[in-house]
Image (cartoon, rainbow, N blue to C red):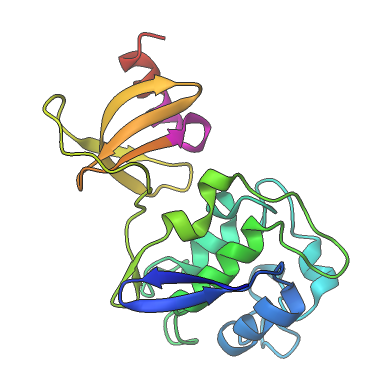
Amino acid sequence: MNSPLLIGSLFLTLPAIALDYEKDVMPIFKAKCYDCHSADAKKIKGGLRLDDPDHFYKRFGKNDVVIPGDWDASYLFVTVTRPHDDEQAMPPEGKGDPLTPEEIMTVANWIHEGAKIGREKGDKGDEEMDPARILKFKDGVLLTEQFVGEEAEPQAGPAPREWTNQQGVTIIATFMGLKDGKAHLLLENGTNTYYPLSRLSEESQAEIKKLSGE
């Protein structure tokens, strides 16, 4: 059975079966990215072809375009969610329309499920990093990362501050403690989240360890 997902005032339905690159993701890139990333491009940007699954698969791996199971660290996801006027956004300004929330969710879920491409499929990502729990949109725009956890009333204590993850995304939250390798962060909206320390930038990790007395 398909599961509905509410994004803003828009319901999205996520398929119950694993997403496949050629069936579910390639049509998105064909419409939005082939001007720069296909055999028909005047110049293949970054040497990356999205119209050739075998070629694309060679760019799967740690610190590369796609890290199966880890959408948050995949360069592909980072580029398709950059502001459209960012010089590193995909597609670049004037080269195509930005991906819609539905398309961004499809890409994120495909990577999270293990980035199935042809017969190859990696391990699924951690449940706590399920895109349906994390990614939020407003008026068609991806908001600064908000991590869903238990609801809580804002608490008195240290003031909120800026933290960054390994992709440079800013998270505004109050640090509440460190447990089992996860930073307890209280977001400005009063929501608690437990963010894996390893996914934060080195600077944020160092500061959290310092605050924790490690």
Q: Quadrant of residue 23?
A: bottom right
Name the quadrant of the N terminus.
bottom right
* Residue 74 seen anywhere in this rendered image of the structure: yes
Verify whether residue 198 appears in magenta.
yes
Which image quarter: residue 38?
A: bottom right
In percent of width and height, residue 182 lies at 46, 28
Q: What secondary structure predominates along the stretch shown in magenta?
A: helix
* Residue sitting at the far right: 119
Up the image or down, 17 lies above or below 32; here it is: above
Q: Residue at the location (34% across, 52% down)?
A: 146
Q: Position of residue 159 (x, y in %)?
A: 14, 30
Which residue corresponds to the image point at 38% horizontal and 48% vertical from the top-left?
Answer: 147
Residue numbers of the magenta segment: 195-205
**Closer to us: 35 or 127:** 127
**Which residue sits at x=32%, y=62%?**
143
Q: Given the current orientation, which residue lies at the most extreme top position?
A: 213
Left or right: where does residue 139 sit relative to residue 29?
A: left
Reply yes or no: does residue 192 show up in magenta. Answer: no
Classify residue 171 as left or right of residue 52: left
x then y, percent, for residue 177: 33, 21
The image shows residue 194, relative to residue 44, as above or below, that is above
Residue at 22% in and 35% down: 161
